[in-house]
Image (tube, grey):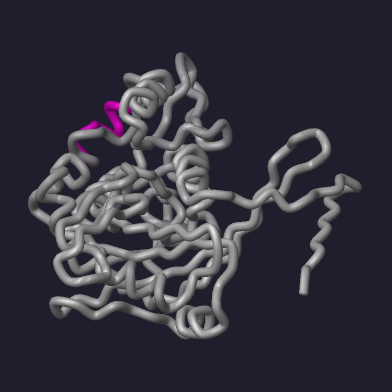
Amino acid sequence: MEIYRQITANNIELKPYPFLKELAMEAYLMENEDILKLDTSNFEDVTVLDAEISLKNGGSASKKNGRIDLLAKYGVDYLAIVELKVNEINNDTLVQLENYLKKRKQIIQKHPEYWTDTDINPKWIGIVVGSSISPELQKQLQEGYTFNFDNIEIPIAGMVIKRFRSSKNEIFVTTDSYFNFKYSKRDFSKFSFNGKSLNKTRLVNQVLKHYVAINPNITYAELENVFPPSIQGSTGVFTLEGQAREIFDNTGHKRHYIKPEELIRLRDTTIATCNQWGVGNINNFIDKINELDIGFNIELE
């Protein structure tokens, strides 16, 4: 039986525009990495680091080499192995992903630049992506599924991506995520500030926005004096918008919030706040806020 699907958005007729090959899906996600967001708080900040990384003995058969489709990073805590299928994702896809996760340490050994924090081991997540999902896998992921290996629980997420094209060749993408993981407070502390629930990186961005709003004439040098780079570490609490964009252009990695609504305008320039915040340095920022005694109420949820 053939299924005819038609979508209309604001009187724009959309027709299915599926990916014909995995490499096409891979390239599209590398250029549009925000599609891989799994939620709106904890797994929101995603960066695709690389593609087509070979793993020795990482295939489904014994002693068969494998190749992961995408390696991504979520915030500063998690690295993700992403397995892509242009058709249905199912239990076979899950088994393939788990074989790759067993060999995940090879990635850091061969490519240490993907994880520069030598004091903390990366946490991992596995993601299967396809154009549809089997009922069995959907139920499994919605109930919360983790892959247990080496006494470590690795959360697994699923995502169904459907692409459409309008008569004007505009591209529209819909995504459905299947992910149910109980975050530990240590891994994903949530904070309340000005009535908003925020993760670590969003907290810094919103606090600085508010601080600048009540100090509208503050300059870059003056703000840096209040929030020195040492609070965050090697990247700094914020930098010039141009420098942040240059870092992204040169490395392909988003170290700062550079979307228009995320930038902060000072009296003499525009800045971008760093998004590299984890357990090791967010407390420095909160301690600084408390030290300033400026009436900012930040509460741990």
Q: Quadrant of residue 294?
A: top left
Decide which of 221, 110 is in the foreground and name it: 110
- Residue 197 shows up from this direction: no
Quadrant into which the N terminus falls: bottom right
Extreme right residue here? 11
Q: Is residue 93 above or below residue 202?
A: below
Residue 229 is one of the magenta-drawn residues: yes
Residue 286 % position (x, y): 30, 52
Decide which of 94, 247 is in the foreground and name it: 94
Decide which of 186, 253 is in the foreground and name it: 253
Q: Is residue 238 above or below residue 202?
A: above
Q: Which residues are magenta?
A: 224-231
Identify the residue at horizontal 39%, vertical 81% (top origin). 145
Q: How many marks?
A: 0
Residue 107 is one of the magenta-drawn residues: no
Q: Quadrant of residue 272?
A: top left
Quadrant into which the C terminus falls: bottom left
Q: Is residue 166 above or below residue 235?
A: below
Identify the residue at horizontal 27%, vertical 27% (top origin). 225
Extreme top residue here? 268
